[in-house]
Amino acid sequence: MRTHLILGLLLTVAQAFAAGGEVQYKLLATSKTSTMEREMNQAADAGYVFSGVMGGETALGGNEVVVVMWKPKGADGVSGKRYKLLATSKTSTMQKEMQAAADEGFAYLGQTVFVSAFGGREVGVIMERNVDEAPKARKYLLLATSKTGTMNKELNDAGGEGYQLRGVTVAKTAFGGSELVCILEKQ
């Protein structure tokens, strides 16, 4: 089953690009993290996969998290992906939530800082799981500091332990004002 799904997805993508590489996009925007996660998974059920994320103020929606998803033009069916959107204002909470998601088979995709409807200013992280693959063992480390020199040292210490940088944001957060927030992964 897994091999058929992977081959089917690869064939669909190959056909789309052979026909001019046309794709369809779906833009999702909301200030509620639970709504975004639900909408991402509904889009995945329609064949879309994650492409990018950014938090900020939109013209009509106010402060929102915006996610762009894509699929080959004309493709039908499910993508085989499940998504989690984690959002918190505390470093230790985010690291725990990311690790719990990783233990369920989810992997880091992207991060942003945004103002949510209920949580205030938060770091948001998008994670993805392929439903047809066995989970890979992953460990996550979240570093947050306002000093670039401190972040440089912490990144090098983590790199010495085998962690690789997956994402970085620079923004005013509830973690501690204007901060660098780096997320690292070790497999």
Image (cartoon, helix red, strand yellow):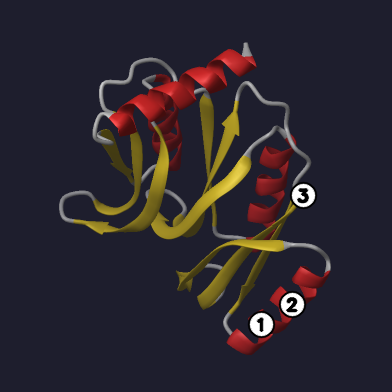
| Marked residue nearer the N-terminal end (1 or 3) | 1
Name the element at disc 1. Answer: helix
Label 3 belongs to which residue? Answer: 187
From this view, report whether residue 99 is shown above or below residue 79. Answer: below
Q: Is label 2 in a helix, a strand or a loop?
A: helix
**Mark 1 → mark 3, Cα distance in angstroms:** 22 Å
Q: CA distance from mark 1 to mark 2?
A: 6 Å
Q: Residue furthest left?
A: 60
The image quarter in which residue 86 lies: top right
- The residue under label 3 is which amino acid type? Gln
Q: From the top left corner, tell me how far across and down residue 157 is, in percent.
A: 79, 75
Q: Amino acid at mark 1?
A: Asn
Q: Would residue 28 be found to the left or right of residue 84 on screen?
A: left
Q: Looking at numbered disc 2 in the image, what kind of residue is underneath it?
A: Asn
Query: Is residue 112 depicted above or below 148 in this figure?
Result: above
Q: Quadrant of residue 54?
A: bottom left
Question: Which residue is more in the foreground, 17 or 178?
Answer: 17
Locate residue 88, reporting x and y percent. 55, 54
Count all numbered tags in the image, as a single digit: 3
Q: Which residue is mark 2?
A: 156
Task: Report the residue marked by disc 1.
Answer: 152
Among all residues in the image, which is located at the extreme front?
18
Q: Is residue 74 above or below residue 152?
A: above
Along the line of sight, which residue is nearer the eye, 1 or 151?
Answer: 1
Q: Earlier in the sequence, mark 2 or mark 3?
A: 2
**Front of the two marks 1 and 3:** 3
